Amino acid sequence: MLTHKKYRVKSELHFFTRNDHLKLLEHCPNEEWRAILTLARYAGVRCPCEVMQLRWTDIDWNGKRMSVPNPKWTPHPHKRIMPLFPEVRRKLRTLFELAPDNEFIINQFTNRAKANLAASFMKIAKSAGIGVHMQPLSCMRLSRFSELTGKFGRFCASVWLGVEPEGNEKFIRLMTDIEIQQAADWEGGS
């Protein structure tokens, strides 16, 4: 484990690539699981607390945005607005066409409050031949945060994923292999 003052980076954290995600999707038992993993990886939605509360009324197809419930922010939970990224939009559209009358996006768990997504995810990951990493659903969220931070800046990434823009030591940015290679080949500096 690497430590630097307040920040702790665990070596078990893994950047989930697009290829990792595609392998997982191939081994999902149904479309709801494909939607869960896509929401975790490309929308950075917390699993299970946020994904289990998402309703179809939270999706604004025309505005290309979604409202994500954030039950962790108590005592006044609210919703945050975030873009309906293309990967998420496509996967949700497929799921919506299968069950347009459902209230919730994810319906396969009888007890929404106690859905054990991590155990099911481990089975999917093992079947896909992807190593099981510490807190894999959180690693998907961290991977998206890293991408969004690189493309749109820390402020947008923080607002969209519902984290404090500054001072949140628990939420770290993961480094991609591409960034490491670019830095290794960079001869810049002032």
Image (cartoon, rainbow, N blue to C red):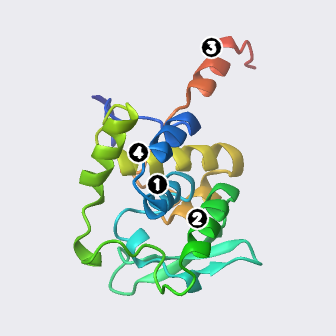
Q: Is residue 104 left or right of residue 124?
A: right
Q: Position of residue 21 (x, y in %)?
A: 51, 42
Q: In the drawing, what numbered circle is on residue 139?
A: 4
Q: Residue at x 46, y 52 (%)?
A: 141
Q: Earlier in the sequence, mark 3 or mark 1?
A: 1
Q: CA distance from mark 3 to mark 1?
A: 32 Å
Q: Earlier in the sequence, mark 2 or mark 4?
A: 4
Does residue 58 sit above or below 132 in this rendering? below
Secondary element type, mark 1 = helix
Q: Amino acid at mark 2?
A: Trp
Q: Earlier in the sequence, mark 1 or mark 4?
A: 1
Say if residue 8 shows up in the picture: no
Q: Earlier in the sequence, mark 2 or mark 1?
A: 1
Which residue was labeled with disc 1? 37
Does residue 77 sit above or below 133 in this rendering? below
Which residue was labeled with disc 3? 184
Q: State which mark lies toward you, 4 or 3.
A: 4
Secondary element type, mark 3 = helix
Q: Are marks 2 and 1 in contact (CB under 8 Å)?
A: no
